[in-house]
Amino acid sequence: MYYQGVKKSIVLRPCSATRGQLGEINPLLERIFLARGIQSPAELDRSLQRLPSPWLLSGMEAMVVHLLDALDKQLPICVVADFDADGATSCALALKGLQMFGFTQVTFVVPNRFEYGYGLTPEIVELVKLQHPKVIITVDNGISSIEGVTAAKAANLKVLVTDHHLPGAQLPAADAIVNPNLLHDNFPSKALAGVGVMFYVLIALRHRMREQGWFAERKEPNLGDLLDYVALGTVADVVALDATNRVLVYQGLARIKANRSHPGITALIEVAGKKQESLSVSDLGFSLAPRLNAAGRMDDMTLGIQCLLTDDPVLAKNIALQLEELNNDRRDVEEQMKLEAMALIAEMKALDEHHLPAGVCLYDAQWHQGVIGIVAARIKDRIHRPVIAFAQADKDQIKGSARSIPGVHIRDVLSDIAAAQPKLLSKFGGHAMAAGLSLAMHDYPAFALAFDTMVSKRLVEVDLEPKILSDGELHERHMTLEMAELLQRSATWGQAFPEPVFHGLFDVIQARIVGQRHLKLILRRPEGHLPVDAIIFFVDHIEQWLGMRQILAAYRLEVNEFRGERSVQLMLQYMEKII
């Protein structure tokens, strides 16, 4: 019997580096860092001084020149945002940051995903024109907005693009583009989120204004005050926490924990039931981000941006409570869609009992556009294959949200399909692990076949058996609160820099159901003497696990806080029944 019905292989995370090269450090912690590619103590430095220069971004000089011109002339600016958490935090950061520099006419527009779709489209330009700006700044979008930028330029608007998505073969004819993923760009971090790119634009602007003496008679902005936005947006967008992003997230989280966050973020923490002083990276990703994202998924991200922008704690709390209601609605919709998606997977297995398609497409005319990305992610985790979930956009078009597995670059798959069949995709864009697309409804069968075929070609060297990478087995002497606290404070764990996972055999002393779908356990290593608490969430067929006597488990060491007491707890990621 396997957790969620899926057998996974537990594989020791490779570590070929030399011991001792990280200086005086706990041996267990050293192995964990070496296995994640850390080669020197400097890479563990999370001070702001470690951030690379903004001038390494290829379009930064032109960007700053245009912004200084807009500031000097006090040109009205409209920020065009994306409708996810990265877009919302990017937008809030842009408005707050530009106002700190002295820009007095800054507004924003965020597309409603159900009416306009993603990015700076010609339709969005028409909305922007109603605000009579002279400059458009895109945040977390724009690199694929060929037609939208053309429409804006035709309306005599200056267009400044800040984005992090992968560019296509053609770039928009913008006045300036800052994107670390541009061809030949020398910025060392290709993993900046949209909010990180906009933060870097502000860093460069301040640097140039400082050089030109702008702050001789006015206060120089403290951009550190905006790092709570950067931390939340970066974690929410699930970008790789490389050295640069680890600094940004650590610094932003430190400010949040020190009660220096904006009222909107403080309110989100409160409605999520979290403690601000002990907030973690995972809390940003799994508690705050879904509540902020719920605005864009279920209604309009304008509400989420207003929550981030307000300086009134009472208003922030009221908006956060509205976001909480939207998130509860999202959960209900997601659960129903997930059940329907798994039923479609069962039908596929019934048609071919030996294997599923290499790339799986799922579509239901009743599915909610705002939730298909989450459903694709959930199903991908279950079947360990790239998945695209589709929903109806209008009577002729459907929209898809794709999620992939390591080794299959999903945007490149879509690019290959578009090259092979140019008329199949209306539009697409995204990253290695996630992407979005649109196509004509009558082309869905042809696309599903093309997707399976193209993914199959990329799976030659990709193992479809799901694996868990482990940092090894832990002796019970390491299963302590002190070790859990050391692991917690020693690094900024997250995407592509994962929190340590260990594995081992355990005797089950006690198992009981909590919250209907979760198991609370007391475990002990077979050769050990000390019991340890453990928990695992969302267990399928949970009653069947109550009689087990021994399990193989993969787990994280967690600090459990309950009624003011702190203790160590194993947070199980996977288990299989041995006896």
Image (cartoon, helix red, strand yellow):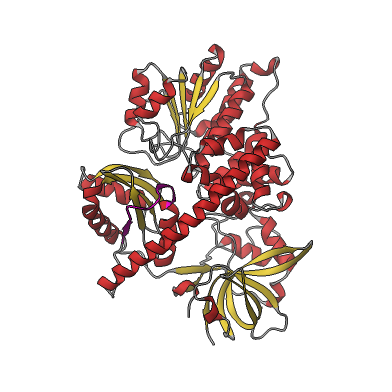
Q: Judge whether 204 appears above or below 444 on screen.
A: above
Residues rendered magenta in the picture = 359-371
Q: Nearer the viewer, residue 163 or 471?
A: 163
Query: How far across and how far down the image is residue 318, in percent?
Result: 64, 40
Q: Nearer the viewer, residue 205 or 304?
A: 304
Number of on-image labels: 0
Is any part of residue 249 visible from this angle?
yes
Judged from this view, the residue extending furthest toward the right is 564
User: On the image, which quarter does residue 355 sit in?
Assistant: bottom left
Q: Tell me: 124 left or right of 509.
A: left
Is any part of residue 262 visible from this angle?
no
Q: Judge whether 311 appears above or below 557 on screen.
A: above
29 falls in the magenta region: no
Q: Residue at x 68, y 23 (%)?
A: 220
Q: Tell me: 263 left or right of 61.
A: right
Query: How far across and how far down the image is residue 522, in percent?
Result: 67, 78
Q: Judge whether 566 appears above or below 447 on screen.
A: below
Q: Judge whether 305 appears above or below 68 on screen.
A: below
Query: How far across and how far down the image is residue 244, in percent?
Result: 57, 44
Query: How far across and how far down the image is residue 242, in percent?
Result: 54, 49
Q: Tell me: 433 left or right of 201.
A: left
Quadrant the C terminus occupies: bottom right
User: On the image, which quarter does residue 362 sit in?
Assistant: bottom left
Q: Nearer the viewer, residue 156 or 297?
A: 297
Q: Residue at x 27, y 45 (%)?
A: 439
Q: Residue at x 38, y 16 (%)?
A: 156
361 falls in the magenta region: yes
